[in-house]
Image (cartoon, grey):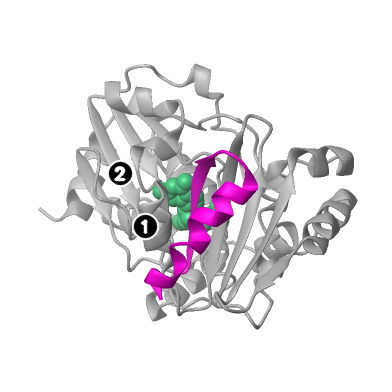
Amino acid sequence: MSLIEQASRAIGDARELALACHIGPDGDALGSMLGLGIAAQTAGKKVVASFGSPYVVPGNLSFLPTELLVAPEDFPKNPETMVVLDAGSADRLGELAVNAKAAATVVVIDHHVTNQGFGDIPLVDPDAAATGELVAMILDSLRWPITPKIATCLHTAIVTDTGRFQYTNTRPETLTLAARLVAAGAQPDEISRHVYEEAPFGYLKAAGAALSRAELDEELSLVTTFITQDDLTSAGIDWGDIDNLINTIRLAQEADSAVIAKVHDDGRVKISMRSRGATDVGALAAELGGGGHRLAAGFTYNGDVAGALNEIRTRIGRYR
Ligand code: 5GP
Ligand code: MN
């Protein structure tokens, strides 16, 4: 049996499903999880969905149908069937990694190239542009219909992980699926408006602070900057509001790679990296304990910004 068939069977046979996606969820994490969750609920299953703390839905994704979401502390402790979406490794689940360990069956649906295959049924396809593509294949295999709500979730997953169908991961199949989702009721104009065309005013202030600190290292073909909890607090915004900021940093045409360091108050620095193509930032992130894709990846560093950026600078030449 193929992994798609195994995953579909485990999901289709379950009476109750507990779904989880990666911490700090993006459009693919939430969209693929909620799309699958709503489809399963429509098929008569008892479904809950969650992600590890901080348990905050990013503002630009709060238009998604979030009624299945429960706080991580209310997530089943010993789920019969747990489905993990868009997480490249178990530690990306935050505190819900414990629940996954205690689950009878864990189905993993993911597309990260750094995913080494965890869980009982690891449906991992790095060729899929988004985890949402794999969810659509599961729904088709179970003959579960795609309602407008599900279409909205899956279209959001695909739009965000392909950068609006601009990244190299966009395949003919991706566009064919997007067309199907629009026919099924997804509204691309509304999705794009929420995700890309609006932000709280404070975003401008926080982005301004981060952009004013950007540094270009021409030798390493690297642009870097950082943003702190203080920047966000004074602007009245949250971490989930700055997910798109890396897209402005990486505009610098002199640099192949772009890095933003997100400095949390607890001594952790969350690194987001992007590459124009010459640098395998996924492999670099994996060496530093994180992961992702060839051209978009991240890791967490315990220490200060200078230390985190130094880890990158001393290694990046090896990933070109
Ligand atoms: P972002 O920079 O948007 O947070 O993440 C870019 C990509 O790298 C996403 O696919 C995300 O799932 C992945 N990623 C970010 N941080 C980590 C991390 O700490 N560990 C792993 N395994 N993947 C990460
Ligand atoms: Mn994804």
* Residue plotted at (55% across, 77% down): 256
Q: Secondary structure at mark 2?
A: strand
* Residue plotted at (86% across, 57% down): 204
Q: Position of residue 300 (x, y in %)?
A: 51, 43
Query: Mark 1 near ligand 1 (CB under 8 Å)?
Result: yes
Residue 205 vs residue 119: left or right? right
* Up-down relation of residue 187 to residue 36 (above or below): below
Query: Mark 2 near ligand 1 (CB under 8 Å)?
Result: no
Q: Label 1 sits on what residue type? A: His
Q: Mark 1 vs mark 2: give the one in front.
A: 1
* Residue plotted at (37% across, 62% down): 283
* Up-down relation of residue 72 to residue 210 (above or below): above
Q: Position of residue 101 (x, y in %)?
A: 29, 25
Do the numbered discs 1 and 2 sit on residues whose CB atoms are within 8 Å? no
Q: Position of residue 113 (x, y in %)?
A: 33, 60
Q: Which residues are magenta?
A: 295-320
Q: Quadrant of residue 93?
A: top left
Q: Is residue 32 visible to us here?
A: no
Q: Is residue 12 visible to us here?
A: yes
Residue under label 1, please give it. Answer: 112
Q: CA distance from mark 1 to mark 2?
A: 11 Å
Q: Label 2 sits on what residue type? A: Val
Q: Position of residue 212 (x, y in %)?
A: 83, 63
Residue under label 2, please give it. Answer: 108
